[in-house]
Image (spheres, rainbow, N blue to C red):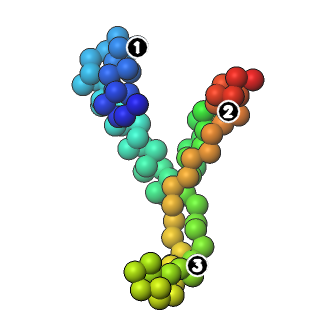
Amino acid sequence: MNKGELIEALATENDMSVSQSRRYLESMLDLIEKKIKKGEDVNITGFGKFEVVKRAGRKGRNPATGEAIKVPARKVPKFTAGVALKRSISGK
């Protein structure tokens, strides 16, 4: 399912227009992005947790030349599925 299909499904299941559904989804995604950019975790009980984690710097290799390079440390977004979501998917 892509973003457009999700918007359509939200509209259908909640008796709202596609434009309302799009605004709702975009607003929710923007809010999650803003919060994790500030370093705040976003916990949705039963679904999961969105957060930013630091990835350590490491040694890498340029595949074209074979030259050793240094890959700098960076921050990356991370999603961890909640217990209820994991159980739902596994059928337990």
Between the residue at mark 1 and the residue at mark 2, the CA separation in whole angstroms equals 23 Å
Amino acid type at circle 1 is Glu
In the displayed structure image, the side of residue 46 where residue 30 appears, left or right: left
- Look at discs 1 and 2 and give the one toward the viewer: 2
Residue 75 appears at what percent x and percent y? 51, 65
Residue 24 seen by the camera = no
SS under mark 1: helix
Residue denoted by label 2: 86
Q: Residue at x 48, y 50 (%)?
A: 35
Residue denoted by label 3: 58
**Mark sitting on residue 37:** none
Q: Which numbered disc, 1 or 3, marks the residue that appears first in the sequence? A: 1
Camera-nearest residue between 63 and 18: 63
Residue 82 appears at what percent x and percent y? 66, 36
SS under mark 2: helix
Q: Quadrant of residue 46?
A: top right
Q: Which numbered disc, 1 or 2, marks the residue that appears first in the sequence? A: 1
Residue denoted by label 1: 13
Between the residue at mark 2 and the residue at mark 3, the CA separation in whole angstroms equals 32 Å
Is 75 situated above or below 14? below
Amino acid type at circle 3 is Arg
Residue reaching furthest bottom? 67
Image quarter hosting the N terminus: top left
Between the residue at mark 1 and the residue at mark 3, the CA separation in whole angstroms equals 46 Å
Amino acid type at circle 2 is Lys
Is 10 situated above or below 83? above
Residue 64 appears at what percent x and percent y? 40, 80
Is 14 situated above or below 76? above
Report crowding for label 3: few under 14, some 14 to 19, many 20 or more residues within 10 A (C-alpha).
Answer: few
